[in-house]
Image (tube, rainbow, N blue to C red):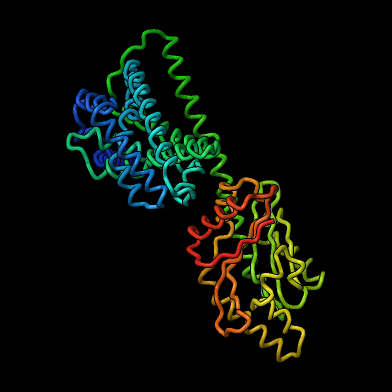
Amino acid sequence: MLTEERNQARKERSSTWDTIRHFIRDRFSLDEDKADENEIIQAISRGIEFRGTNLWALIFAILIASIGLDVNSLSFLFGAMLISPLMGPIMGIGLGVGINDLDLIKRAFKNLSIAAIISLITSSLYFLISPLQVAQSELLARTSPTIWDAIIAFLGGLAGIVAGSRRDKVSNVILGVAIATALMPPLCTAGYGIAHGNLSYFVRAFYMFLINGVCISLATFLIVRLLGYNQKEYPSAAIERRVKNTILAAVLVVLVPSTYLGYQIVRKTIFEQSAKRFVTNEGNFQYRQVVNYTARYQPDGSRIELMVVGEPLPPDSIQLLKAKLPAYGLGNTSLIIRQGALKDAEVDVNTITSTVTDQIIKYSQGSIARKDQTIDSLRNYIEATQSAHLPVADLRDELKTLMPDVQTFTAARSLVMSRTGNRPDTVLLVYAKFSRRHRPAEKKRIENWLRSRTKSRKIKLIVE
């Protein structure tokens, strides 16, 4: 009797598991509406060639993307990515590897090389004649490839080949893949690097294009193998081994550096969030105020700089602040406090003697009532400027891309009072220290970039 009950229970569990497996297989199956294998191979093969219509579409897409990067327009970039036919040869490489078609691999790689060269020439010529010379944020975003770009390209490639292998092509999926994989903007950014002689831009942007291409091809290869397409025989074992080694090398070239860069970005983001919490929670002092701070991340040792006005902090208070850093995950971070008179800070005092901050320092030496008035004025100033908080760290990183020799950078919006007027004006006060002396034209370029990036009407740039 007991044996029968056990057998019955085992049958019920087996039946339940079979039902679950059948449900999963039915829901996630790629076989139900799969197009004919030969039809898919022919469709992808037709999209490989770059001649006639495809070639002109590529040139037009490159020009639209270059203009989009130049004027910082996402809508232009989206349009260029939808027009671009670059997905064809990239998926062709993945398909060729998946079915062991060496001729298809060679033809796809040849056409992809032609497309890349034409794209670089077209974008370089555009940026050479363009009157806009300042690198905008959309362009700079294509110079920092990370593992996230690889993941997005891989997922986009999976969606693209799955949609492309259906009898009824899922057009909205294919259009979305064209935008998500973003093949066109990195090539245009590489062209910008060529036009301006910036090797760093060219290498970083072309590497991002390489990441996208390899991951899309890899996704195509995996889906083709999953769908069980018929595979050809390589002419020899040596050629088969060479193809496999090339695929492995390409994947490693993409994943290893991008993983490291992504890891550093994650660490930098965590550091900046921790630094913000530290300043917010611990930067409240009586009779003094933190008017600005900068958080500089470095893998071997970061630092936080606080600019404090009001009565100087005693040494024991400073040591207590430093002792609290590990509690915020900032154990390897040095704390620098700039306080007291502004003559001790790295700014040109003559340009800000009439600011509210300078008035607060002068009045803070008076009576208790005047101290209270000073603190209230400073609090109002902080509240008025919080809504216009500047991403100093992001500005610094973008300036490093424009001017790699920058050593120190800070920016803050300041209220300026004229000698006779009663109405304050707002000025973006920027201080930057470089390892070499810059020409007036280079300073003007930095000012134009700041004006475009921060949307500020008035800028005072102090350069050392």
Report the residue at 52% width, 55% height from top. 449
The quarter of the displayed image where residue 374 is located: bottom right
Is residue 15 visible in the rendered image? The answer is: no
Q: Nearer the viewer, residue 146 or 346?
A: 346
- What quarter of the picture does the N terminus occupy? top left
- Extreme residue toward the front, this view: 440
The x, y position of residue 47, in whole percent, is: 26, 28
The x, y position of residue 285, in whole percent, is: 70, 76
- Extreme residue toward the left, this view: 168
The x, y position of residue 51, in whole percent, is: 27, 26
Is residue 62 visible in the rendered image? The answer is: yes
Q: Nearer the viewer, residue 39 or 394?
A: 394
Report the residue at 78% width, 74% height from top. 312
Q: Quick check: 193 above or below 463?
A: above
The x, y position of residue 362, in whole percent, is: 73, 81
- What quarter of the picture does the C terminus occupy? bottom right
